[in-house]
Amino acid sequence: MSVINPLWVAAMRRHWPLVGAVVVFVLFLLVHVAFFRPTADRYQKVVRKAEELGVALAPAASAEVMPPRVYAMLAENALPAAKAKEDGDSGALSASLVETVSRLAARRGMDVVITEPAPTTQQPQSVVVRAHMRVRASYAEFVGFLADLSAQEHLLAVDRFTLQPTGGGEQLVDLYVSRYILKQAPVKP
């Protein structure tokens, strides 16, 4: 005599894919409850404790590392806040910008007609130093000068320029240049 009703056995044979899926689901559920769930709970507790201690175990919570070239560029263009304000107000940063731009122009063979510092702007996180210059140069010399400016380690920008032909293949270039100096926050002990 069979323990299972023959009608049920016939129904299970007809619907064997459904019965198999239910059996597999129950097995996966038991394995999940018995093994994976406790392990996941322990992991979450460890992550919470680590965050309380200040250690980041989760990849999303870890601090991003600044690329070395970016760090070097920021270090090269930063001054302590007090020194940046003092040098900006005294004109030392303006003189440095005028000297740098004049040196680059002379290296390209450009004739410097005028160089003058422009107003310095003190911002909460940076100092913006500006200079105005007028030079005589060929177009090729001026393009090379712009390439030299872009290759500098300083944060230099050409705000605007105008080219006026003077004859003989030369241009009279009226140029406004800016340099950005970042203010470093004071180190907290």
Image (cartoon, rainbow, N blue to C red):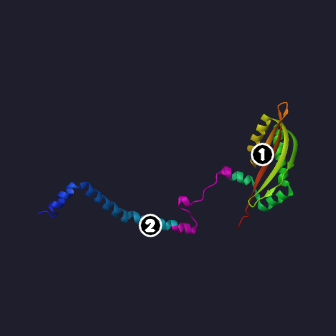
Outermost residue, top side: 168
Vertically, is 184 above or below 135? below
Q: Residue at x 56, y 69 (%)?
A: 52
Nearer the observer: mark 1 or 2; the answer is: 1
Q: Amino acid at mark 2?
A: Asp
Residue 61: where, in percent of width, then height? 56, 61
Residue 63 lies in the magenta stretch: yes
Of 75 and 84, nearer the camera is 84
Q: Amino acid at mark 1?
A: Arg
Q: Which residues are magenta?
A: 48-70
Disc 1 element: strand
Question: How far apart are the two marked residues, 1 and 2, measured between alpha carbons?
Answer: 61 Å
Residue 58 lies in the magenta stretch: yes
In the picture, measured across the screen, residue 97 lies left or right of residue 30, that is right
Q: Earlier in the sequence, mark 1 or mark 2?
A: 2
Disc 2 element: helix
Is there a contact, CB below 8 Å, between mark 1 and mark 2? no
In the rendered image, is residue 127 in sight?
A: yes
Residue 21 figure quarter? bottom left
Label 1 sits on residue: 160
Residue 63: where, in percent of width, then height? 60, 59
Vertically, is 151 above or below 14? above
Label 2 sits on residue: 41
Of 87 and 7, nearer the camera is 7
Q: Residue at x 79, y 36 (%)?
A: 141
